[in-house]
Image (cartoon, grey):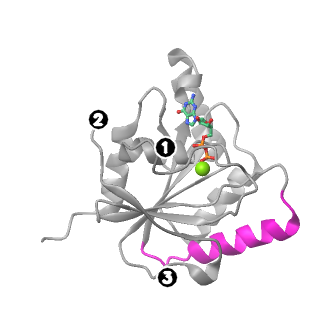
Amino acid sequence: MRTYRAHFVTMAPHVGVLPEPTLQEIAMVGRSNSGKSTLINFVVGQRHLARVSQRPGKTRAIVFFDVEERFHLVDLPGYGFAKTSQKEQGQWERLLLAYLDPQARPLVGVLVLFDMRRDPDELDMAMVEMLRSAGIAWRAVWTKADKLKPSQRKNRAIKLDKLLGTEEPGLMVSSKAKLGRDAIWSWVDERLGPEAPA
Ligand SMILES: Nc1nc2c(ncn2[C@@H]2O[C@H](COP(=O)(O)OP(=O)(O)O)[C@@H](O)[C@H]2O)c(=O)[nH]1
Ligand SMILES: [Mg+2]
């Protein structure tokens, strides 16, 4: 499995400290515990780049990673924590909306993660609606495929596509069973477009 050169760039806990846009950005978002940090590590082939199962309730921030000096992989703060005050919810929304402004960022695509055992709920639908109304290209990712029997996976993916109303079928992955990484990279490469001549 190829290892990509990747490193932490910066972390923005609020709108005022979002970094100046430089490289193109690919973001990941999803409910807390949907497997975002694990997928980031799987995609770049490093075990400890993003922290897995970071305790909820910690500062929710947007985290920027550099991949091969080619693009920034952006870890957006998860949603759906059990204990979230109205104030925290408002902060999360402001931060996310500020980031998801196509005029403000060189954001070329967002991967939206779903634990494939769960049905998308109203928070997931609101997330997708936010991306649709901002006109941002996004793709659903069904995570933790290893938790289902191989014979169940395809039907479940079809059901999830229906529930979410995806334009393109979601990409099924398992970081644990090492499934689906190439499809993620194909999508990322497509979104980034041809490499600029050196
Ligand atoms: N079985 C299995 N567990 C996973 C997979 N991806 C993540 N997890 C587990 O799900 C939990 C949450 O993962 P994490 O990456 O921290 O989720 P995040 O909150 O979205 O960043 C952790 O216990 C992970 O080990 C997967 O593909 N298969
Ligand atoms: Mg995480």
Q: Is residue 9 above or below residue 15?
A: above
Of circles 1 and 3, the one toward us is 1
Distance from disc 2 to disc 1, alpha carbons, whole Å, reads 14 Å
Q: Which residue lies furthest to the left in this view?
A: 198
Q: Viewer-proximal residue, 171 or 7? A: 7
- Label 3 amino acid? Gln
Distance from disc 2 to disc 3, alpha carbons, whole Å, reads 36 Å
Question: Which image quadrant for residue 68?
Answer: bottom left
What's the residue at 63%, 60% (across, down)? 77
Q: Does the magenta stretch include residue 50?
A: no
Q: Which residues fall within the magenta stretch? A: 84-106
Residue at mark 1: C-beta within 8 A of ligand 1: yes
- State which tag comes first along the sequence, 2 or 3: 2
What's the residue at 69%, 51% (across, down)? 124
Asked if the residue under mark 1 is in contact with the one under mark 2, i.e. CB atoms within 8 Å, the reply is no
Residue at mark 2: C-beta within 8 A of ligand 1: no
The 10 Å Cα crowd at callout 1, few under 14, some 14 to 19, many 20 or more, is many
Q: In this view, does 194 lie above or below 34?
A: below
Q: Viewer-proximal residue, 162 or 96? A: 96
The N terminus lies in quadrant: top left
What's the residue at 45%, 45% (across, down)? 41
Residue pointed to by mark 3: 103
Estimate the x, y position of residue 11 in percent, counting from the top left. Answer: 55, 69
- State which tag comes first along the sequence, 1 or 3: 1
Which disc, if any, is residue 1? 2
- Label 1 amino acid? Leu
